[in-house]
Image: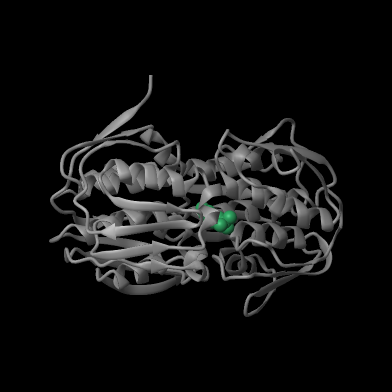
Amino acid sequence: MENTIQVRPARRLRGEARVGGDKSISHRAVLLAGFSQGVTRIVDLSPSEDVASSLRCLQMLGVPVERPSDTEVIIRGRAGRFAQPPGILDCGNSGTTIRLLSGLLAGQSFTSVLDGDDSLRRRPMRRVIQPLALMGAQIEAREAGYAPLVITGRSPLRAIVHTPEVASAQVKSCVLLAGLQAEGLTTVREIRQTRDHTERMLPAFGVAVQKESLSVSVQGPTVPTSPGTLRVPGDPSSAAYLWAAAAALPGSEVTVRDVGINPTRAVILDALRRMKADVRVENVRLWCGEPVADVTVRGTGNLVGLEVGEALVPLLIDELPLLAVLSAVSAGTSRLTGAEELRVKESDRIATVVTNLQRMGARIEEARDGWTIEGPAELHGAELDSFGDHRIAMAMTVAALLARGESRIRNPECVAISFPRFFEQLEALRD
Ligand code: S3P
């Protein structure tokens, strides 16, 4: 039977929360820990299904993984040499798992097969296949560009200088991880800045990283060494739903503690400020090279629309559906351009946002590379669909909180891909 959840409008949200560890940082921490020399303890690991996919793949590659608790993991690294997996590496719904792991497997002297769910099988993989093939790996893919991928590694790989056609942290990270196993200097020249967690984490594993504006290089071959313990900041892309709901509901005040504010991720806070939300960042600290803070958002009830263009898209990529929801209830015209990348995420996020928001009475028009929204609209409760995409499920739940009347959301369980306790934590903040 199909699962649905009923969401009532909210008057306001008040209180404090801690969200799970950052999903992007957690993927990198577990993959590097599994590949490195030594034992790594990772604290405040993301409880997401996506990171569980990375851990499951590592276990198939002969990496011993202990789970003292839900939020902690102890990983004994394989010092640069994985074991040939006994079966298919199931990456589930996780684009980060398949793309980053491809980089590591490209330098291993065996053949492995990576696959995932129906959504992952529709995500473009040519963007990683092409540079890894130039480095010397042999990769076969369905229709030359989709999972399952069959990777026969080569050791050592050849170093390359790569300029990805799309601004993607997953592609950058894939090539840098392959670069650890390449003879010489591997460089990624980005067309636009994307999240920089890989570059920040590699030095903790003893790998020198050269950075020059939009270029990042690593010298190989090298085996990373475990830093001992890593602590993962709270995920700003999860916190964003709580902040956005607070921003739109007058009288709200929500504080998220110990949350990551890396400048390549916390652009959502600037976006909220530009929309005239009241945002306070306090108690800034550094955890393993990543800035962390306590962030409070207060609802003023007078939000204004926002223009987002190509330059900011990679830095707001996961928050764009949520910004569409806020824009629908904000005064004036909001426009998103240069965001065709949204069409190849877990769902076609331009189509799934537009379909859902139109059902609620928002004035939103679809464009090839984004949308235009005229606000403020008074949203009404509606029958909504997650389309199996976690970020659509959560963005539409926020929309339902802001609407008049109840909404129902189909297939809400996919929130567990990134934020398993989303509904519970949101309910706890209702006032
Ligand atoms: C991620 C990068 C982004 C983002 C995804 C996680 C990462 O994808 O959308 O949720 O961990 O590197 P792209 O880099 O492909 O845009």
Residue 83 in view, yes or no: yes
Can you tell which quarter of the image residue 136 is in?
Answer: bottom right
Q: Residue at x 40, y 60 (%)?
A: 236
Please say which color scheme the image uses.
one colour
Please tell me how many numbered marks the rendered image carries. Answer: 0
Ligand 1 shows up in which quadrant of the image? bottom right
Q: Residue at x 35, y 55 (%)?
A: 324
Above or below: residue 117 compared with residue 28: above
- Give coordinates of residue 268: x percent, y percent: 38, 65
- Give coordinates of residue 309: x percent, y percent: 46, 68
Q: Nearer the viewer, residue 226 or 145?
A: 145
Residue situated furthest bottom in the rendering:
212
Horizontal side, residue 330 vs residue 95: left or right: left
Above or below: residue 72 compared with residue 195: above
Q: Residue at x 55, y 39 (%)?
A: 93
Horizontal side, residue 49 vs residue 158: left or right: left
Horizontal side, residue 326 vs residue 167: left or right: left
Q: Residue at x 78, y 50 (%)?
A: 106
Q: Nearer the viewer, residue 149 or 343?
A: 343
Q: Nearer the viewer, residue 425 or 359?
A: 359
Can you tell which quarter of the image residue 16 is in?
Answer: bottom left
Residue 243 in view, yes or no: no
Q: Looking at the rendering, in which quadrant would you find the N terminus? A: top left
- Give coordinates of residue 219: x percent, y percent: 77, 70
- Give coordinates of residue 175: x percent, y percent: 72, 60
